[in-house]
Image: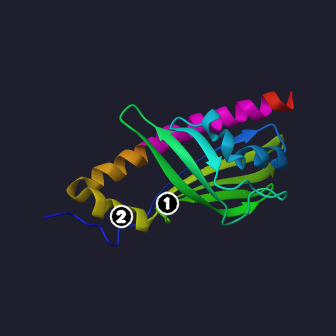
């Protein structure tokens, strides 16, 4: 018998830092998915399926990410969901399995950068189908990886932006 959660709530997590940089500078970095491997514990590279136009990434644009952990290497197809310069950049992994979001808010001394991760209901359902009785453990493993990785990603982004600002 396999366990297939069908109405499990989405799992979410977020973390924030204040960066001594403008929202425009922060957005330029977080929306440049080709640089994601410089900041992430898991993502080692990303590339656009088709280069963004002169306005930058737009909702519907697609990219592929290569991820690596000690246990495995895999690629994911992602779709930009929101691209609001200086405010918000988000994308969906796969067909709506996970949502990653960067939210930017001007504050005294720079920009509050919030990274948000949501393991969506469809992702939980797909993991139930894919992993059966191991689904809960697999979802939990991804949840803990997000919890551990976000502070390091935010610190790497903050460091890069503040060095860039000089």
- Residue 53 horizontal/vertical position (percent): 80, 58
Residue in the image at 41% along x and 47% along y: 142
Using the image, determine if residue 4 lies above or below residue 75: below
- Residue 129 horizontal/vertical position (percent): 29, 64
Label ID, residue 126: 2
Q: Can residue 67 be seen in this view?
A: yes
Observer-nearest of 87 and 96:
96
Do labels 1 and 2 touch, CB within 8 Å? yes
Q: First in sequence: mark 1 or mark 2?
A: 1
The residue where tag 1 is placed is 94
> Is 154 contained in the magenta span?
yes
Using the image, determine if residue 90 lies above or below residue 154: below
> Is 30 contained in the magenta span?
no
Q: What element carries label 2?
A: helix
- Other-residue count near label 1 (Cα within 10 Å), few / some / many at <14 / 14–19 / ≥20: some
69 relative to 57 in the view: left or right? left
60 relative to 9 in the view: left or right? right
Query: Quadrant location of the C terminus?
Result: top right
Give the residues drawn in magenta, as a range. 145-162
Label ID, residue 3: none
Instruction: Name which quarter of the figure residue 34 lies in.
Output: top right
Q: Is residue 39 visible?
A: no
- Residue 157 horizontal/vertical position (percent): 69, 36
Observer-nearest of 39 and 45:
45
In this picture the colour scheme is rainbow
Q: Distance between the residues labelled 1 and 2?
A: 11 Å
Observer-nearest of 18 and 49:
49
Q: What element carries label 1?
A: loop
Residue in the image at 48% along x and 45% along y: 146
């Amino acid at each position: 018998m396999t366990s297939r959660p069908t109405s499990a709530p989405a799992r979410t997590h977020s973390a924030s830092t204040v960066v001594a940089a403008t929202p425009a500078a922060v957005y330029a970095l977080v929306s440049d998915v080709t640089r994601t491997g410089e900041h992430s514990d898991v993502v080692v590279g990303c590339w656009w399926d088709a280069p963004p136009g002169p306005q930058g990434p737009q909702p519907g644009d697609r990219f592929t990410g290569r991820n690596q952990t000690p246990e495995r290497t895999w690629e994911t197809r992602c779709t930009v969901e929101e691209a609001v310069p200086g405010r918000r950049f988000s994308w969906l992994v796969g067909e709506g399995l996970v949502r990653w979001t960067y939210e930017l808010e001007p504050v005294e001394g720079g920009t509050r950068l919030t990274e948000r991760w949501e393991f969506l209901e469809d992702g939980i359902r797909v993991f139930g189908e894919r992993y059966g009785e191991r689904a809960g453990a697999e979802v939990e493993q991804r949840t803990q990886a997000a919890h551990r990785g976000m502070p390091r990603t935010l610190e790497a982004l903050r460091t890069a932006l503040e060095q860039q600002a000089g």
